[in-house]
Amino acid sequence: MAIHAGLATGGWTRLTLVEQLGNIGSEVDRALRSWELNRVERFEKALDRALELFDLTASDERWSGHRRREILRAREEFVRVFFDPDVPADSAAGLSRYFLQFATLARRRKQT
């Protein structure tokens, strides 16, 4: 069962890539904060939501080639933060900065 049922049935494809990545960033930040605070249940739910949004974005037919590779690379780095024992110390902060740019741009575009 999809966590984001409305988005999985087509709502996600109505968003621009910037909006999609901004929304992914919200879940990424929730997962990172929950991980840091050792809130296991919240972390697991945020992780699941983020991965679902990554997968919805990667399966969006509008994004192919280098865009899809970038989406899947970001997903890989996101998972690596939690499950790779050799992850660089600044990886979580780098992911937050990366996705914040998309959220900021999406908000600016919505306001104009």
Image (tube, rainbow, N blue to C red):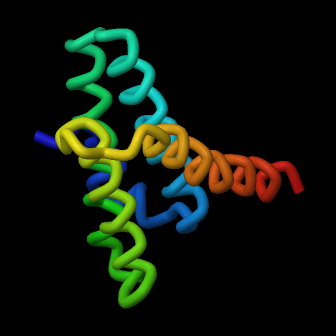
| Residue found at the far left of this picture | 1
Work out whether residue 51 can be spotted: no
Kindly identify the residue that appears in the image at 34 percent across and 81 percent down: 61
Kindly identify the residue that appears in the image at 22 percent across and 13 percent down: 40
Of residue 52 and residue 25, the one placed in the foreground of this image is 25
Of residue 78 and residue 59, the one placed in the foreground of this image is 78
Q: How many numbered marks have been drawn onto this rendered protein structure?
A: 0
- The relative height of residue 80 versus residue 83 in the rendered view (above or below) is below
Residue 104 placement (x, y as % from top left): 73, 48
Q: Is residue 112 left or right of residue 13?
A: right
Q: In which quarter of the image is residue 19?
A: bottom right
Q: Quadrant of residue 109?
A: bottom right
Kindly identify the residue that appears in the image at 63 percent across and 46 percent down: 100
- The relative height of residue 102 versus residue 13 in the rendered view (above or below) is above
Q: In this view, does 22 lie to the left or right of 36?
A: right
Residue 96 placement (x, y as % from top left): 55, 42
Q: In which quarter of the image is the N terminus?
A: top left
Work out whether residue 69 can be spotted: yes
